[in-house]
Amino acid sequence: MPSNDTDRAALEYLIGDIVGRDLSAAPALQAKIRLVLLDTAACAIGSMNDPVVQQVAERFGTLSPGPVRIPGTDIDTGIADAVFVMTMAACWFEACEGVASAHGRPGL
C-alpha cells in the first residue's frame, strides 16, 4: 500500500492512466489493479538480485548511460533501457501474477 496520500494519489493516477478511465466507481477493480502493479514491480525489483539480470542491467548502463535509475540497482540508463530491463526482470522468475490462458503479464 502507498505510504502516504501523495503516494496513493500518484498510484491512483497511474492506474487510471493505464486503464484509461475513472475507476472510483469500481473500487474492487481498482484494488486488484493496484495489487497487480505492485506485485509486478516487486517481482522485477526482487529479480535484480539474480546474476544474469544484474549483468543485463549493467550492460545497458554501460552501453547507454542516462538519467533513469534502474530500481533495485545503482545503475543509471535511458528510460527505454530501464523499461526493457524491468520488464525482463518482472518475468525472470515467473512469480508475478498473469493470465495463464493468455500467457500474459497484466502488470507489464
Image (spheres, rainbow, N blue to C red):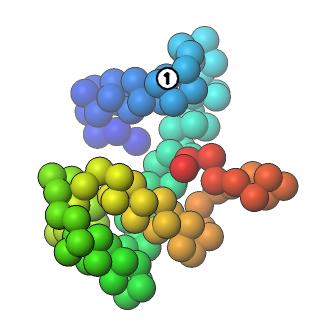
Q: Residue at (51%, 55%) from the top-left corner?
A: 40
Q: Amino acid at mark 1?
A: Gly
In the image, residue 20 above or below residue 88: above
Q: Nearer the viewer, residue 20 or 66?
A: 66
Whether residue 42 appears in this view of the structure is no
Residue 89 rendering spot, x and y as whole percentages: 46, 68
Q: Is residue 80 above or below residue 64?
A: above
Judged from the image, the secondary structure of the residue bearing numbered disc 1 is helix
Residue that protrudes farthest toward the bottom in the picture: 51
Please, is residue 69 above or below residue 37 in the view? Answer: below
Residue at screen point 21% across, 53% down: 68
Q: Is residue 43 left or right of residue 32?
A: left
Q: Which residue is mark 1?
A: 16
- Does any portion of residue 66 appear in the rendered image? yes
Residue name at image x 49 percent, y 66 percent: 88
Which residue is nearer to you in this view: 16 or 52?
52
* Image spot of residue 62 (x, y percent): 20, 75
